[in-house]
Amino acid sequence: MSTRTLIRGGLVITAADELHADVLIEDGRIAALAAHGSDIAAGWTAARVVDATDRYVIPGGVDAHTHMELPFGGTSASDTFETGTRAAAWGGTTTIVDFAVQTVGHTLREGLDTWYAKADGNCAVDYGFHMILSDVNEHTLKEMDWLVQEGISSFKLFMAYPGVFYSDDGQILRAMQRGAANGGLIMMHAENGIAIDVLVEQALARGETDPRYHGEVRKTLLEAEATHRAIQLSRVAGSPLYVVHVSAEEAVAELAAARDKGLPVFGETCPQYLFLSTDNLAEPDFEGAKYVCSTPLRPKEHQAALWRGLRTNDLQVVSTDHCPFCFKGQKELGVGDFSKIPNGLPGVENRMDLLHQAVVDGHISRRRWIEIACATPARMFGLYPKKGTIAPGADADVVIYDPHATQTLSAATHHMNVDYSAYEGKTVTGQVETVLSRGELVIEQRKFTGRAGHGSFVPRSTCQYLN
């Protein structure tokens, strides 16, 4: 039996267009678009009709950087794949790309299979995986080829966290060379972790233990230096490079300089760097621990450079780096020693709304909102045009968005499995009303109607943003 849904009367916004159009959905895909009021649209019938009058009809968000159930610092991220993908749906995100972790001494396959098992049958929306490389050697380099063929086409390396995820320049170069050969995109956590560890040790020795020192030791110059080094290594390897969670003006400048040379170098930032700052890290009574993440929050003056980078396309993507730890019992592990605070913030539910607020505030246009949150992440990570747009043949991942509603972000009302909101009390304009994932209603008029297990693993092609 064919299942048809008709979305009538909304303003369809994609990265390329804005048009008043009706959208016909059939068998989980977009079947057709036609101008609202046209003879074609008037002739359509469907079992389910959704009224989108005075609403935006936008593609489901693609969050290309999440960490569900990530073990870190003796604990684990508090969102499971079930709770995290449900929260994503509430926030208008219909695809996540999470990070499977290889642990030192183990194969990529073992790490990937562990993450398949965590996610399988538990997700409310669709998901894919990147692979974290923690141990670059001859065997894991071969495994990269196999993973690309399996639809795991991006690999993250760390210049930070010595003893855990850290790779040295030689390992990074080898992985980049392999990526250049097999089409895998290298993602980089660009911070000089060796130097940072020295500064951490020195700060603690001085008795500087509060959360704010987490930001002070992780210097902007050490993010910029690592970004510069990663770019040069990628040039030597002939490999594209994607720098994750860019937070500092100096790092944006390194990316802009590389792009001015025509190099295939890309950058993402996250809402926390656009809306929060070191003022939050300095909140008294250990409250600043809520905002400990890496790269760290920066002084407010860096925000202008990040917004500018998003407008000039020196930064292409906004992801969340969603990695929540509860304040009680998890963040508190670092009382008396900021280096023991689990690194990460909740945000998968807030990204689309915060970026719509950026439209309202005049930082970006409506189409740029969709570009950085939906279309470009889909293209960057081999999901386009199945994901990230509203066009015939695309998956019917569609959000009905009320641009006039106002809401106050709060832990009391969010759906992430974490006991605080990084944006507590912030009022934003715009709210998700209805969400379809592959044509199935998962949020209907602000009620969750989805289910664990609806979400499917999505194998990805290689980066399409290079074309």
Image: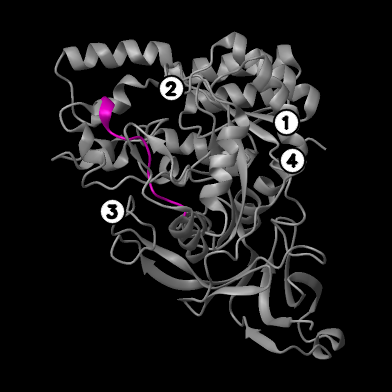
Q: Main secondary structure of the magenta part?
A: loop
Task: Report helix, strand or loop for mark 4.
Answer: helix
- The quarter in which the C terminus is drawn is top right
Q: Examine the structure image and report whether residue 342 is included in the region drawn in magenta.
A: yes
Residue 418 versus residue 67 in the image, above or below = below
Q: Kindly identify the residue that appears in the image at 71 percent across and 15 percent down.
A: 235
Graded by Cα atoms within 10 Å as few (under 14), some (14 to 19) or many (20 or more), the crowding at tag 4 reads few
Q: Which residue is mark 4?
A: 150
Q: Which residue is mark 2?
A: 164
Residue 351 versus residue 171 in the image, above or below = below
Verify CB contact (< 8 Å) between mark 1 and mark 3: no
Going by the numbered disc 1, the residue's amino acid type is Gly
- In magenta, the rendered stretch is 339-348
Q: Which residue is mark 1?
A: 184
Quarter of the image for residue 277 reads top left
Graded by Cα atoms within 10 Å as few (under 14), some (14 to 19) or many (20 or more), the crowding at tag 2 reads some
Q: Residue lying furthest right in this view?
A: 40
Mark closer to the observer (3, 2): 2
Residue nearest the observer in this picture, 191 or 362: 191
Going by the numbered disc 2, the residue's amino acid type is Val
Q: Which mark is residue 420?
A: 3
Q: Earlier in the sequence, mark 4 or mark 3?
A: 4
Q: Kindly identify the residue that appears in the image at 24 percent across and 11 percent down.
A: 202
CA distance for labels 4 and 1: 11 Å
Q: Earlier in the sequence, mark 3 or mark 2?
A: 2
Residue 94 is situated, as x and y percent measured from the top left of the image, at 59, 60
CA distance for labels 1 and 3: 36 Å
